[in-house]
Image (cartoon, helix red, strand yellow):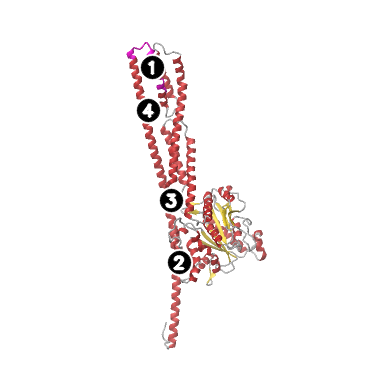
Amino acid sequence: MASEIHQTGPICLIENTNGRLVVNPEALKILSAITQPVVVVAIVGLYRTGKSYLMNKLAGNNKGFSLGSTVISHTKGIWMWCVPHPKKPGHTLVLLDTEGLGDIKKGDNQNDSWIFALAILLSSTFVYNSMGTINQQAMDQLHYVTELTDQIQSKSSPGENDYEIEDSADFVSFFPDFVWTLRDFSLDLEVHGQPITADEYLEYSLKLKQGTSEKDKNFNLPRLCIQKFFPKKKCFVFDRPVNGKKLAQLEKLHDEELDPDFVRQVADFSSYIFTNSKTKTLSGGIKVNRPRLESLVLTYVNGISSGDLPCMENAVLALAQIENSAAVQKAIAHYNQQMGQKVQLPTETLQELLDLHRASEREAIEVFMKNSFKDVDHLFQKKLEAQLDKKRDVFCEQNRKASSDRCSALLQDIFSPLEEEVKAGIYSKPGGYRLFIQKLRDLKTKYHEEPRKGIQAEEILQTYLKSKESMTDAILQTDQTLTEKEKEIEAERVKAESAQVSANMVEEMQIKHQQMMEEKEKGYQEHVKQLTEKMERERAELMEEQERTLTSKLQEQTRLLKERCQGESTQLQNEIQKLQKTLRKKTKRYGFHKLKI
């Protein structure tokens, strides 16, 4: 729902004040208004390299993120602009513009490293912006990528080898796609006289040197990190947009005033980002929406502020705690809503209420399963189960009370005239007992015919009749038309009838108890069933993610092996050529001109 987003310009998300990173509460309020999945694009690079211009274009504007036109970095901290995604309905495009790295006024590389790491952790597409070509200077400026394993943990309790570049699979699973944008690029895209694409130029620039010297290691390290950490890489080159002082007024210039090739290149870049940037996803295929992105920002920045390394596993677990707690509340709210709409107390039978409970419980569990993830040891599901059991018991008690109140009111309406007649002495005469018993039967029949008395109907009736036994016995004893023997027989009949009613009530209570036990078992089985189905889905998703990670790692290893083989083949060819040259010299020296090599 794009209508939810009303951010007309960027706002600072993470402030950088005196070298300290602080989350801006106003920016979090904007995030809290977004309910859709988010595509997060972050851009990083040296200051004064034109990062903000590209981000403004992605936002569909010429102005927004501050461009600046001096040698001092304008953007401080990390700024955010949330706009409706132009190509993916139902998604929000979150643009993150970071302060320029290497600002001469900061003098603190550690601060730059955290900005770099946060941009990677929060984004689904990471854009690195630099000037000119990909040469060793450009690689040296990208030294932050070599420090990532010092800035980020994938696990809360890493093993002793988990920080090594060779064990990068955990990082690959949650690192964003990598896009390198080269500004003011003036060279021809060709190698050995053959034209190449910008992507091929990037791959060529990332080739490793064969050698083990310290110089070779320093040359290879940033290249190896990019190859290992980022599963998908893309490169764009941009011509200089304008010449001279007009460059300082770039945001005020219209497209027709810019170099046509530059305008086309910006359009190609924007189209690629809109089409190929994925929804921000965490390990396990968890799609990030507003509350999740908000939680990630707070978790990472608070971790940095407390001196800890941002840990992906801890961030996901913290996120799970928040979301699973909310999932329980959503499930209970859905249960309450469904029961409120479906249940009319009192119900005629206990089973009617339990059937309604089970249907609502099933839907509530579905709501929880849909909104929860990484419920370690199923703690939150157990909380939900306990709350649903309590809700069921509360409804049963409310049902019992509603039935009792309804039946008591009916008895008052139906039997109060009879009580008045007894007080008036109408039945204190010969033959009065038979008249009283007949009237009593008629009133009981009328009571039984009344609808929606509920589960307490018989118990409340028998309790009432038992309370009137003395009145009945008094009428019996005063009826002079009955012999003593008839009175004894009638008293025994009433006593036997009362005993039978009591036995029936005990049996009914046992049946209700059995129904409750069966309902608890059915509820438990429903929890197990839905949990099993969810675990199967998560297992399949995890296997897919592991397969993607393994495939990426194997492809990278294959490529490196191929490069190594090519390097060794070239070295072998060079050795053969040297040997041939030596042999030619020797044959010429000793006059073996007929010797063919």
Residue 379 in the image: x percent, y percent? 43, 46
Residue for badge 3: 538
Residue 363 in the image: x percent, y percent? 45, 41
In the image, which residues are magenta? 464-486
Residue for badge 1: 473
Q: Are marks 2 and 3 in contact (CB under 8 Å)?
A: no
Element marked by disc 3: helix
Q: Measuring 49% from the left and 66% from the top, which residue is drawn there?
A: 221
> Which of the two labelled residues, at mark 4 and mark 3, occupies the earlier sequence position?
4
Residue for badge 4: 505
> Which of the two labelled residues, at mark 2 and mark 4, occupies the earlier sequence position?
4
Element marked by disc 1: helix
Q: Are marks 4 and 3 in contact (CB under 8 Å)?
A: no
Work out whether residue 201 can be spotted: yes
For discs 4 and 3, the disc positioned in front in the rendered view: 4
Q: Amino acid at mark 3?
A: Glu
Mark 3 neighbour class, 10 Å CA radius: few under 14, some 14 to 19, many 20 or more: some
Establish if 410 lies above or below 91: above
Q: Measuring 64% from the left and 64% from the top, which residue is drawn there?
A: 242
Mark 2 neighbour class, 10 Å CA radius: few under 14, some 14 to 19, many 20 or more: some
Q: Measuring 45% from the left and 18% from the top, which residue is drawn there?
A: 419
> Which of the two labelled residues, at mark 1 and mark 2, occupies the earlier sequence position?
1
Element marked by disc 4: helix
Marks 2 and 4, Cα distance to the nearest angstrom? 82 Å
Marks 1 and 4, Cα distance to the nearest angstrom? 23 Å
> Which of the two labelled residues, at mark 1 and mark 4, occupies the earlier sequence position?
1
> Which of the two labelled residues, at mark 2 and mark 3, occupies the earlier sequence position?
3
Q: Amino acid at mark 4?
A: Met
Residue for badge 2: 560
